[in-house]
Image (spheres, rainbow, N blue to C red):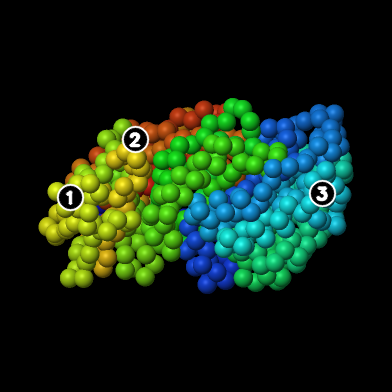
Amino acid sequence: MLTRTRALACLTLLCSLTASSAQAPVQDANKAERLEWFRDQGLGLFIHWSIDSQLGVIISHSLAGASDEYVDRFYKDLPQTFDPTHFDPDALARLARLAGFRYMMFTTKHHNGFAMWDTKTVPFNIMHTPYGKDVTAELFTAFRKQGVAPGVYFSPDDFLWLHTNHKQIERLVPGVQPSANPGLLKLDQDQMTELMSHYGPIAAVFFDGEPKGLRDIVWRLQPDTVITRGAIETPEQNVPGAPLPGAWEANMTIGTAWGYQPSDEHYKSVHDLLRILIHTRSRGGNLLLNVGPKPDGSLAPEQEEALQTLGSWMFINSDCIYATRPWVVTNEGDVWYTRSKDHHALYAIVDDEDNAPIWKRGTARDFVLKTVRATPKTTVGVLGQNDKIVEYRPNLDPQSTFHQEADGLHVHVMRAQRLRDSDQWPYPSVIKLTDVEEAFTPPVVHTLPATVTPDAVIFHGGWSAPEDAPGAEFGFEYRIITGEDTRSRLHGWQHLPTQPAPHPGEFTATFHPDAAEHYEYRAVLKHPLLTLYGEDVILPAK
């Protein structure tokens, strides 16, 4: 290990170099006040729906590498049979509002090129199907009535245009990008002009592909629109290990697929969805949670029921989700934090491990919050309950209490509200604290550039802090990203052995990659109080 002074100096230099050379999101034309609005929303509904929901295969991507016969059938036959007779936009919008969604993002056009609105640019659109009605207009009207702001997902990549112009159907290679094909770019520009001109106020736009030549149309026609992908960070199928600066948005599926798949689908549990939401908000991001309607326009029962239960939790606990920002740390073990943007309220979200006993109604628990210090104005309570009674249990006093000690704020709370016929509510409970102060300055962890040798890769990372941390350990995690879209991450992190790290400094570890795979890695500090992560860094491909 380097000497402490030299290590900290190296860390400072390397961090500044990393910050200056990283691909920073372009936010210059997203209005600052609209980005603040966007951050306050917390939870958005993603809707992936297109003509190939009839097939139950991956949305659009089945065309990549497909035979000419398959492609011809796709474009000729599917429009003749698309008739979503059970599509009820008002019911979907009501469900979204009840579930706590503040905005939505709809796939007006996915990569397959099918337009889900009444476009004048191509006949391959919803008006040339047996349904024959403007799905986009119906959805936007219904969601606005429920107070849920509508947003546009739009793919600049267009497989129909590629097919028609005798180009290979694929993505993310120079020859098929709109910037290399003036005809495709003109089509995209005309379509974006339609969407931004004829469908009322659009809260947000998500460009799933090259935004060049399209963002200026959005900001010129609707200056208050927030562009998400294409201007801010939008990690896909994963939540970053550390807070990202400014506004960002995690995009996650309710199961494993974006579009509807009738078989081989594995839905996340409601607890898993809540955990994703809590972890995202504790790191300052929005969660854009995706559903995929069936070919008839309805939701699969598993998706609808999950949203209904999510709505139960949000009805009780939405204060810890809306208009919040990160606390000084994301979590202390199983207790996760968000803080109101005015700093008046701190929310301690108790998310026990899956194998932990369920916190039953009428049961009290004690917590020591090491990063929190009380003030003379501090109050403590549990969201949703009045702290006065436990129904049918007059002998119990559910009043929340607290007292400050040298090791942290000691909080005593009881789950008192009856939410199920039984005494069990298996989802996180939220403790609200008001007018508290920070009692801890967390270390800063950075992932540094790796050293690549002919035989191995040397990971570099380090941490800095005002004081030592006896018992701390430092290590690295890596995951395979071979064949992934630029922001998608489907593989979980794998861990290298940790090493003692009681003092700030730089650390290394040796990694032997598979030459056929592509990887990214990050540094990890296991501090006695919490686990902290450095930036995700992509290893150069060999």
Hey, what amino acid is under mark 1? Pro
Residue 132 has which mark? 3
Q: Which residue is mark 1?
A: 394
Q: Which residue is mark 2?
A: 354
Give the mark nearer the N terminus: 3 vs 2.
3
Which quadrant of the structure image shows residue 427? top left
Residue 101 horizontal side relative to residue 355, left or right: right
Instruction: Classify mark 1: helix, strand or loop.
Output: loop
**Mark toward the viewer: 3 or 1:** 1
**Mark toward the viewer: 1 or 2:** 1
| Image location of residue 395, percent across then percent down | 14, 48
Real-space Cα separation, disc 3 to disc 1, in angstroms: 61 Å
Is residue 381 visible in the rendered structure shown here?
A: yes
| Image location of residue 68, percent across then percent down | 84, 31
Hey, what amino acid is under mark 3? Gly
Hey, what amino acid is under mark 2? Asp
| Residue drawn at (23%, 60%) of the image | 380
| Image location of residue 187, percent across then percent down | 82, 56
Instruction: Classify mark 3: helix, strand or loop.
Output: loop
**Mark toward the viewer: 3 or 2:** 3
The relative height of residue 448 versus residue 61 in the rendered view (above or below) is below
Q: How many neighbours does mark 2 have within 10 angstroms: few (below 14), some (14-19), or many (20 or more)?
A: few
Count of numbered tags = 3
Give the mark nearer the N terminus: 1 vs 2.
2
Instruction: Classify mark 2: helix, strand or loop.
Output: loop
Q: Nearer the viewer, residue 224 or 17?
A: 224
